[in-house]
Amino acid sequence: MTKIVNSWNDFDPLKHVIVGRADHSCVPPEEPATSEKVPIDSPMRGMWGPRPLETVEKANAQLDNLARVLEERGVKVDRPSPLQWNQPVITPDFRTGSMMTCMPPRDTLLTIGNEIIEAAMSFRCRYWEYLAFRPLLSQYFNEDPEFLWSQAPRPRLSDKSYKHNYYDERISLEERLVRTANKDFVTTEEEILFDAADVLRLGKDLFIQHGLTTNRKAMEWFKRKYPDFRIHAVNFPGDPYPIHIDATFVPLRPGLIINNPHRKLPEAQRKIFEKNDWQIVDAAMPAHKEPPPLCYSSVWLSMNCLVLDHKTVIVEASETNQLEQMDKLGMNVIPIHFRDAYAFGGGLHCSTADVYREGTCLDYFP
Ligand code: NVA
């Protein structure tokens, strides 16, 4: 029996990780939580169904390459077991035409120390996504006597969980920004809702983005679940589509974090970092003007990097500005091509979930 699960942050030496798979991925039909997140000019509007096979194969080739690069550096890599995602999701409370993918494990699984929590996600199409990770979690449970396997309270995702008529195609970008500033999002406070990728882990402190995929009730749940931790609700007023913190606020090593210059952390919340001598650096501008076709994410996947240890980071190979900035910040950079995987759910950080990083739970903000 060995210790398999341990991770307290995103920068200590990575030893074991899950890398997603794109097989059978679908563009899901619109539903209350997703319509808000698909930009009005996106060709994804109104379309749904299996993604073209050729794009799935290209994404899988880049995901397999990421797994190979990690293994070459001594990181153990596990892969999920994709379902046939084109099946409908039917519960007593809702019905939707298809599921989505298990490509971004970062949204579904949250590792905190020796615990992995299956998140309470707000997309109906992602209701069963955790099943793709069950064979792995079951294996960890059998082999690691200290592994805590948890599931956040399962949301019902009934109509009460969403503000209806929240989404309106006529809403301008400025109005969206006002909504973000006012913390007015599509989900209600009916039940606990969060995506794991909204949680930034820094030892005893969890910085959780309040936005389209995570509500206040989730913050309250984390407070009660981890009474010895400090839970910080963070909100980035410059983001018209606030989903997931990992293209907005990305730590590279203790004391250093890059922040999306269009989505700056508000002054009051910067204080905790500055008081503890952390440097918050504006991330480099993305090298691309547009995300790839059929992609949910923004060009800021440029900063969605995977840190292997305090000196080493994997960055998307065409993101020349970001590569250069990492180098200037004293990181050894491993460039790998990954843009073909973006449309399936995100960048290098999104596409992985921590199983084991060396290190313990430190207090970076005493
Ligand atoms: N909201 C983010 C998602 C990052 C994983 C973006 O598209 O910028």
Image (cartoon, rainbow, N blue to C red):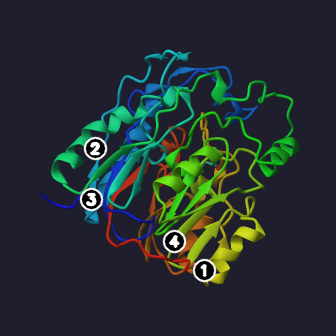
Q: Which mark is residue 252?
A: 4
Please tell me which of labels 4 and 3 falls first in the chain. 3
**What secondary structure is marked by label 1?**
loop
Q: Nearer the viewer, mark 4 or mark 3?
A: 4
Find disc 2 in the rendering and name its residue. 137
Please tell me which of labels 1 and 3 falls first in the chain. 3
- Type of amino acid under label 2: Leu
- Type of amino acid under label 3: Glu
Q: Which mark is residue 71?
A: 3
Pinpoint residue 112: horizontal percent, then vertical percent: 40, 58
Q: Which mark is residue 278?
A: 1
Pinpoint residue 100: horizontal percent, then vertical percent: 48, 29
Q: Identify the residue at horizontal 53%, vertical 76% (top origin).
A: 327
Q: Are marks 4 and 2 in contact (CB under 8 Å)?
A: no
Tell me the CA gap for discs 4 and 2: 27 Å
Please tell me which of labels 2 and 3 falls first in the chain. 3
